[in-house]
Image: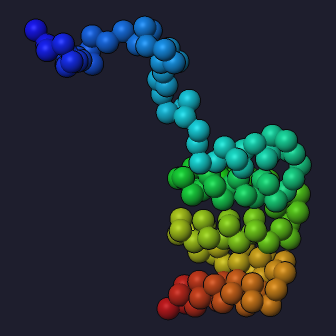
Amino acid sequence: VAAPDEQPALDPDTIDVSTIPGETELVTSNAELPGPCDPTAAAIASSPWDLDALADHAGCLIGIGEFENGAGLYERVLAFDPGHFPAALGLARLRERQGRREDAARLFETAANAALTDGQALSARAAARRLRQDDDS
């Protein structure tokens, strides 16, 4: 018997959560938890034709390991705007990681041609050149 001012030990297997205020809605799977890409998905939901939002979401998906979904979004953006710098650069980096060096080099050149700054263009061209030189070695 527990002392009057002590609480008995609780066995987690016997607790009825329906009797605990505020505990009736338990999270039962990770699908119900907010995900890291929820903000970018929400941006797309509110503006489905925003190519920058699509590219941002693609980058987020790739960041969490959803490579095919991310690549598909980058490709969709490039289908609408072949000179979309973030999409071309993001897809180039993904293709390089996948070992698709010539595809990556071509996409780095696309990114270089669409760059907003000289620094972006130089960096993308250097990446394309590096990939093609490595192939020649």
Reply above or below: 8 against 47: above
Residue 98 visible, this orientation: yes
Q: Which coloring applies here?
A: rainbow
Q: Is residue 71 left or right of residue 55?
A: left
Total labels: the figure holds 0
Residue most extreme to the left: 1
Residue most extreme to the front: 4
Quick one: quadrant of the N terminus?
top left
Image x and y of residue 78, in percent: 82, 61
Residue 103 visible, this orientation: no
Q: Is residue 17 left or right of residue 79?
A: left
Q: Residue at x 78, y 53 (%)?
A: 54
Q: Nearer the viewer, residue 38 or 70?
A: 38
Image x and y of residue 2, in percent: 13, 13
Q: Residue at x 63, y 55 (%)?
A: 60
Image x and y of residue 31, in percent: 54, 31
Reply above or below: 8 against 99: above
Reply above or below: 98 against 126: above
Image x and y of residue 134, in percent: 53, 87
Q: Is residue 103 left or right of residue 28?
A: right
Q: Residue at x 58, y 42 (%)?
A: 35
Q: Is residue 102 left or right of residue 14?
A: right
Q: Residue at x 53, y 68 (%)?
A: 97
Which quadrant of the figure has residue 117? bottom right
Q: Nearer the viewer, residue 85 or 52?
A: 52
